[in-house]
Image (spheres, rainbow, N blue to C red):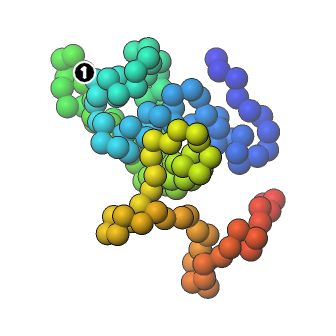
Amino acid sequence: MKKKYELPCNIAQTLNIIGDRWTLLIIFEIFSGKKTFKELEERLTGIATNLLSGRLKELEKNGIIKAELYQSSPPRYIYSITSKGEDLREVFNSIILWGHKYLEVCYKKIVDKNTGDEVELRYFNPKTGILLKDDEVEIVEV
């Protein structure tokens, strides 16, 4: 059984779900349109088939993806992101933005589809309708 973080921390508990090696890359590939086991396996060079299978089952169990049977013999599935998984999009975008800023060799950036201009993530208060700066938000205990 895999070790879990027992810390009372959102980051630790989230890593218990998505922090294993390959897991974020699997989710990202499904976001990017890879829907079948074969497509994922081809795209994620070096992942063992049993590891990919296990990660997909865990992601489904945790409600991040859903598997839909499209062939019964042998069983084959199409994977898609759930609404719970869709809420990870900002996490991926944050990682891509960080990488674009700090990696020596960068492979991706995030741009406005209409203008091609690079974009930034911002904090938004839905009650006030105001965009906030980094120094205007804080992490608090709940």
The quarter holding residue 78 reads: top left
Secondary structure at badge 1 equals: strand
Left-right relation of 69 to 25? left
Reading the image, the residue beneath label 1 is 75
Viewer-closest of 77 and 41: 41
Q: Is residue 17 visible?
A: no
Q: Which amino acid does the dot numbered 1 rest on?
A: Pro
Q: Residue furthest bottom?
A: 128
Left-right relation of 103 to 38? right
Viewer-closest of 119 and 19: 119
Residue 75 drawn at (x, y percent): 24, 21
Q: Quadrant of the N terminus?
A: top right
Residue at 46 percent of width and 63 percent of height: 118
Q: Is residue 51 visible?
A: yes
Q: Quadrant of the C terminus?
A: bottom right
Residue at 80 percent of width and 62 percent of height: 140
Residue 116 drawn at (x, y percent): 36, 64
Residue 127 drawn at (x, y percent): 60, 82
The quarter holding residue 121 reads: bottom right
Q: Residues within 10 Å of mark 1 (few under 14, many from 20)?
A: few
Residue 81 drawn at (x, y percent): 38, 45
Residue at 54 percent of width and 64 percent of height: 120
Left-right relation of 5 to 78? right
> Considering only vertical position in the picture, is 107 above or below 86?
above
Instruction: Count how many numbered circles sit on residues in the image.
Output: 1
